Amino acid sequence: MARGRLAIAVAATLFHFNDAFFFVPLLDRSRSSHRYVQDANRCSDASGSDDADNGGLDAALGRLDLTPAQFAQVQSRLLSVTNSGNQHSKINAEGNLSWLNSRLGLLDDRTRLAAIVTGHPPILGYAIKTNLEPTVAFFQDALQGEDGADVTARLAAFICESPELLEYNVKKRLVPRLERIRAGTELCGPLDEKTLRIIATKTDSRFDEWLLDEVGETQVDTSTADSDNYDHLDQWN
């Protein structure tokens, strides 16, 4: 009997929670089980709170079939941007992914959504009204020209391939450069994707050079030609 009681006293049961194992002595099972449930609830509450704090980032990324390396890269870069002190950067992963999916007609294509997110993680921290919508609309209008053709498929392909272009300032950079091209060429038709990338990415001095060589503009404003200002983190002003 003493040996039997000793066996019971030293026996333990194994609980599993979130890939962690806990040994709970059987003799204290009722008290320890209560403690276990409390700990589990605290872990669950903390996890939900963290995901709420980061705009549902973990849940949103979990639906994109990212590799562990991609998940970590996106999470690290996006959180570093939002923690940099930029008051305009607030993660809205669920909302932004839903908006991009609808606006670009991606039809819940995880591969294409993942391409956008991994290509430019900060996109999940952009404000839809003041950043995403104006920039996407600019590229759509430029691709369309005045004929009003449906360019949804081209626009989606363009953004999926170059999502980083959505960071540039529409009012300060994209529109003024497009107007200079239109004025220099009297071009009212659609622009191609290559020209749009040039408008967005070239520094001021290199854009002026390109405009002279390719478009033939003779009156180039060189006041900012050497500033190399990307005008991409001030989209909200």
Image: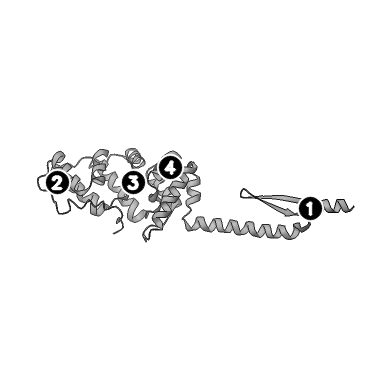
Q: CA distance from mark 1 to mark 4?
A: 51 Å
Is residue 218 shown to the viewer in this render?
Answer: yes
Q: Amino acid at mark 3?
A: Glu
Q: Which residue is mark 3?
A: 164
Where is residue 222? Give x, y as percent: 14, 51
Which residue type does callout 4 highlight?
Ala
Picture residue at 58% right of the left edge, 58% below the top: 45
Read off the residue under disc 4.
114
Q: Dot 4, crowdedness within 10 Å: few (<14), some or many (≥20)?
A: many
Q: Which residue is mark 1?
A: 10
Q: Nearer the viewer, residue 56 or 26?
A: 26
Task: Give the x, y percent position of residue 96.
Answer: 41, 51
Q: Earlier in the sequence, mark 2 or mark 3?
A: 3
The residue carrying pointer 1 sits among few (fewer than 14), some (14 to 19) or many (20 or more) residues within 10 Å by Cα, namely: few
Q: Earlier in the sequence, mark 4 or mark 3?
A: 4
Please indicate, yes or no, whether residue 192 appears anywhere in the rendered image: no
User: Label 1, label 3: how many angstroms apart (C-alpha)?
Assistant: 60 Å
What coloring was used for the rendering? one colour
Q: Secondary structure at mark 3?
A: helix
